[in-house]
Image (tube, helix red, strand yellow):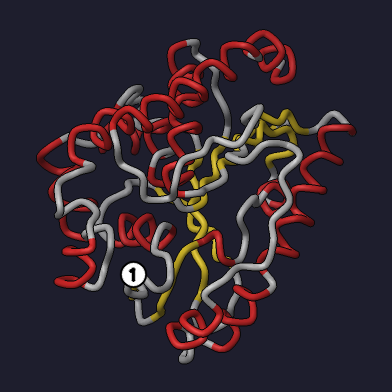
């Protein structure tokens, strides 16, 4: 019975997930597979590279660098989160990603992206996290309005959360039938229809099927949450979620706010550590 971990996105709510996976690394909690969406992928990849503390460290250190995330970056490059800085300079030079460990770790790691033409989610298995695979990681976290679509092998992709925010069912279909699901919203959360309708229609005018998925996103999201809790009741999922809203914006980069949310993730994981060990067997 293959075990897995499913990591929701949510921008800097992902610091909660970073705290959770660092506790798992420190306590030798292992999985056969992992799937991350958006920040769940960009922070969650450190689980496979076994780099506890890295996501918190570089966000606190470089979060206020305009090249990392800023309106200046959006104006100059078209991406709120600077592509070259975040996905090249940072992992290659400033806070090196452990490519060797990532590639040698048997854990199967997937990230979710949204196909701009079909409006469907795509599950990309990352073997090395280099080259085009890093582009998939970037695409998974590329929100409309503040990011370019990422072109890979002639296709265009955007944020995975637009089409599959909590891909538990899809991950089960890949063979991972006993899963820890890390949510970044409290259990009682219900997603409402998104705003900025005119701007979204303008930004996604070339991608009508993806636009349709965006406007139906709240329904899909709420259905996925219902499925997660159903699988928990059936004994096939263990859910880790904040006890209350994290009260942090998607692009919040104040070090004290990042630390607070990260610490909440650690606290929640430690509180449930023995139960998780028992669940995974």
Q: In which quarter of the image is the C terminus?
A: top right
Residue at the image point whose x is 32% and y is 30% from the top: 56
Residue 12 in the image, given as x and y percentages of width and height: 42, 43
Residue 88 x/y as whole percent? 17, 52
Judging by the rendered image, the residue that carries numbered circle 1 is 147
Q: Which residue is painted at 57% across and 81% down in the image?
A: 211
| Pointer 1 local density, CA inside 10 Å: few below 14, some 14–19, many at least 20 | many
Looking at the image, which is closer to me, 266 or 234? 266
Count of labels shown? 1
Q: In this view, does 221 lie above or below 231?
A: below
Between residues 235 and 214, which one lies in front from this camera angle? 214
Relative depth, front residue between 259 and 149: 259
| Location of residue 270 (image quadrant) | top right
SS label for mark 1: loop
Q: The N terminus lies in which quarter of the figure?
A: top right
- Taking the spot 62% from the left edge, 60% from the top edge, the residue there is 164
As drawn, 49 above or below 13: above
- Please identify the residue farthest to the right as the structure is shown: 234
Residue 152 seen? no
Residue 236 sits in quarter: top right
Q: Would residue 51 appear left or right of 272 to someone viewing this image?
A: left
Which residue is painted at 20% across and 51% down in the image?
68
Viewer-proximal residue among 99 and 219 = 219
> Hey, which residue is sitting farthest left in the picture?
93
């Amino acid at each position: 019975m293959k075990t897995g971990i499913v990591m929701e996105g949510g921008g800097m709510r992902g610091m909660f997930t970073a705290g959770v996976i660092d506790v798992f690394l420190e306590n030798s909690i292992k999985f056969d597979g992992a799937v991350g969406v958006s920040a769940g992928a960009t922070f969650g990849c450190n689980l496979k590279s076994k780099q506890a503390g890295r996501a918190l460290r570089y966000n606190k250190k470089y979060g206020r660098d305009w090249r990392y995330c800023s309106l200046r970056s959006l104006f100059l490059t078209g991406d709120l989160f600077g592509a070259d800085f975040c996905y090249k300079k940072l992992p290659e030079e400033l806070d090196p990603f452990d490519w060797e460990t990532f590639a040698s770790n048997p854990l199967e790691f997937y990230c979710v992206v949204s196909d701009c033409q079909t409006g469907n989610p795509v599950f990309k298995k990352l073997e090395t996290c280099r080259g085009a695979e890093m582009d998939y990681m970037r695409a998974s976290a590329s929100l409309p309005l503040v990011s370019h679509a990422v072109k890979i092998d002639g296709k265009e992709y955007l944020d995975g959360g637009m089409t599959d925010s909590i891909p538990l069912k899809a991950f089960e279909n890949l063979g991972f039938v006993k899963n820890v699901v890390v949510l970044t919203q409290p259990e009682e959360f219900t997603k409402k229809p998104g705003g900025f309708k005119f701007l979204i229609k303008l930004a996604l005018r070339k991608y009508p099927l993806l636009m349709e998925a965006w406007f139906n996103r709240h329904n899909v999201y709420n259905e996925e949450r219902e499925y997660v809790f159903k699988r928990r009741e059936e004994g096939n999922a263990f859910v880790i979620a904040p006890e209350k809203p994290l009260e942090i914006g998607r692009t919040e980069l104040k070090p004290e706010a990042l630390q607070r949310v990260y610490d909440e993730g650690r606290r929640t994981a430690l509180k449930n550590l023995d139960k998780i060990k028992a669940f995974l067997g």
